[in-house]
Image (cartoon, rainbow, N blue to C red):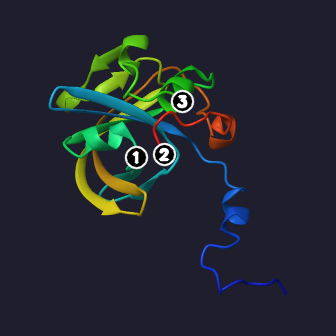
Amino acid sequence: MGTRSEEEPGKGFDAFTDLLDYPVYVVTAAAAGARAGCLVGFASQCSISPPRFMVWLSTANRTYRVARDADHLAVHLLPPDHGLAELFGGRTGEEVDKFAAVDWDAGPAGAVLLRAAPAWFVGRVVGRSDGGDHVGFRLAPVAAGRGPRARPMSFREVRDIRAGHPA
């Protein structure tokens, strides 16, 4: 029988999460004339009927500050090269205009859509949940698109990217 540590909540949790390999996303937000986007590792479909998807944004991140005022967010799967992941995960919008370095279009409800993404959806923010150092944005999909078939980039493939936002 294995051992369990109940004296320190969370102790050993890394042993569990280190085994996970899930898709990563770029989430973009636009509000009050500002645009922002960041690499997101914490996200998942959270309801089938009605369809809902939850994305968790770090409260230290500029994208979170823009998203607080946004009615809609865009969620993008990433192509298998590191370009978008490096830009949106390794750079901060405090120092660089990420959107000047990529091709993008204005989408439904003013959402920012990255042309290089193999798939995306725009979701209306229907709820928020405080999760500690991240806030979850529950999204109701309003539009989606898909380009050429590509395998989405996973967390293991971006582990080496040093976070661009301030700690």
Helix, strand or loop under label 3: helix
Horizontal side of residue 143 vs 48, given as left or right: left
Q: Earlier in the sequence, mark 3 or mark 1?
A: 1
Q: Secondary structure at mark 1?
A: loop
Residue 60, numbered circle:
1
Q: Which residue is mark 2?
A: 167
Q: Nearer the viewer, residue 90 or 81?
A: 90
Q: Residue furthest right?
A: 1
Counting residues from the N terminus, which is met first, the one under dot 2 or under dot 1? 1
Q: Is residue 16 left or right of residue 112?
A: right
Q: Position of residue 59 (x, y in %)?
A: 37, 50
In the rendered structure, the answer to whether residue 110 lies left or right of residue 57 reads left
Q: Nearer the viewer, mark 2 or mark 3?
A: 2
Residue 91 in sight here = yes
Give the number of the disc on residue 117. Answer: none
- What amino acid is at disc 3? Gly
Give coordinates of residue 117: x percent, y percent. 47, 24
